[in-house]
Image (cartoon, helix red, strand yellow):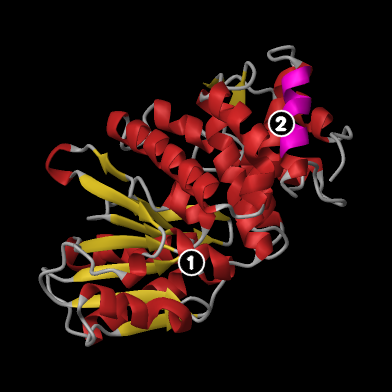
Amino acid sequence: MPELTVSLGDRSYPIRIADGLLDTEAALPITGPCLIVSDDNVGPLYAERLKRAIGRPDCPLWQMPAGEPEKNLQRFAELLQAMAAQGLSRNATVLALGGGVIGDLAGFAAACYMRGIAFIQIPTTLLAMVDSSVGGKTAVDLPAGKNLVGAFHQPQAVWIDTSVLATLPEREFRAGLAEVVKYGAIVDVGFFAWLEQHADALLAKDPTALANAIAHCCRQKAGVVARDETEQGERALLNFGHTFGHALEVIGDYGTLVHGEAVAIGMQLAASYAAHLGLAPDADSKRLQQLLSRLGLPTALPSGVDADLLVAKMRLDKKAVSGNLRLILWHGIGQAFMTDDVDASGLRNFLNRPIGPA
């Protein structure tokens, strides 16, 4: 059973990864009242198993409708009201049982309720397992942009049961693979090559391949978070593809593309743009496109997306500085870097060019 640690001094916490973890007695740091937060897809499947695992059959469950459009201020307020109605005190623990939407929303509510209470991440999607559950980023969306309201609030633990991926819809599973690819793309050419070699095993949900990929991504994320918790430098590289991707999600009202699909397109745009600028080999851009396509992910802008609108939405991204675009590009596989030197006019012209097959 892989067990990793996010090292943040007295706020350090474990990441446990195992098949069937929800069917074992949990050694989780829960001493006071608790509340399980989930959605109407995940809650009916796993909430009772979680209660048995933590030995708390009386732990109440709060559910909301599933989907990114639900990660908003209204649901945030409803959750806070539910926490108050349950009489949660300062020693309470929120258990985030679900994908990235639930983890972000529950974590943000935990960060704000009584100025901060404990929460534990129990991710049920591949994307959340390898990315959003680790690192303490919590937030909700606004109509103007994704994750614009939030806080850094580290969990007490991250508890990953890979068996739950069996019930994950295929589209969501493939979307999670985009975040897996990201770790190879930004800092680890060896892992990128491993993904090329094991793409079929990952698509088949081979337990060993999945466990290896998840553990590798969590180890990478844990190291970055330990070195740059609040994204002042290195951690920004984890946003490779996300400035493009978040803008695409906003344009589609969070309903056209799921997050991983938008990130896949964003990574390909970033790689292709770097090649267009002469900063990276075009061969690496094509290699990325081949891997993403092999994993069933889109790599080109959806038809009808206006380049001017996309760039305008990108300016509202959290990584923008005083309205100026900040992008994560690369010099090739494993060599991501951040730049504020982005010519908006040139980027618009580039976006109007065909990038590759969708």
Residue 197 falls in image quadrant: top right
**In the displayed structure, would residue 97 be above or below residue 284?**
below
Q: Residues within 10 Å of mark 2 (few under 14, many from 20)?
A: many
Tag 1: amino acid: Val
Q: From the viewer's side, name the closer residue of 346 and 301.
A: 301
Q: From the viewer's side, name the closer residue of 237 and 80.
A: 237
Q: Is mark 2 on a helix, strand or loop?
A: helix
C-alpha gap between disc 2 and disc 1: 28 Å
Please give left or right for residue 167 compared with residue 280 in the image.
left
Residue 64 locus on image (x, y percent)? 46, 80
The residue to which callout 1 is attached is 164
Residue 205 locus on image (x, y percent)? 60, 55
Q: Residues within 10 Å of mark 1 (few under 14, many from 20)?
A: some
Which residue: 33% across, 37% down? 230
Task: Let me know if residue 265 is in the magenta part.
Answer: no
**Residue range of the region highlighted in magenta in the rendering:** 283-291
Query: Could you say which disc has been placed on residue 288 in the image?
Result: 2
Q: Earlier in the sequence, mark 2 or mark 1?
A: 1
Please give left or right for residue 230 compared with residue 267 in the image.
left
Residue 229 falls in image quadrant: top left
Which residue: 24% across, 83% down? 59
Residue 275 seen in this snapshot:
yes
Tag 2: amino acid: Leu
Please give left or right for residue 34 compared with residue 10 in the image.
right
Residue 51 falls in image quadrant: bottom left
Which residue: 35% across, 83% down? 48
**In the displayed structure, would residue 351 be above or below residue 159?**
above
Residue 246 seen in this snapshot:
no
From this viewpoint, which residue is outermost toward the top?
278
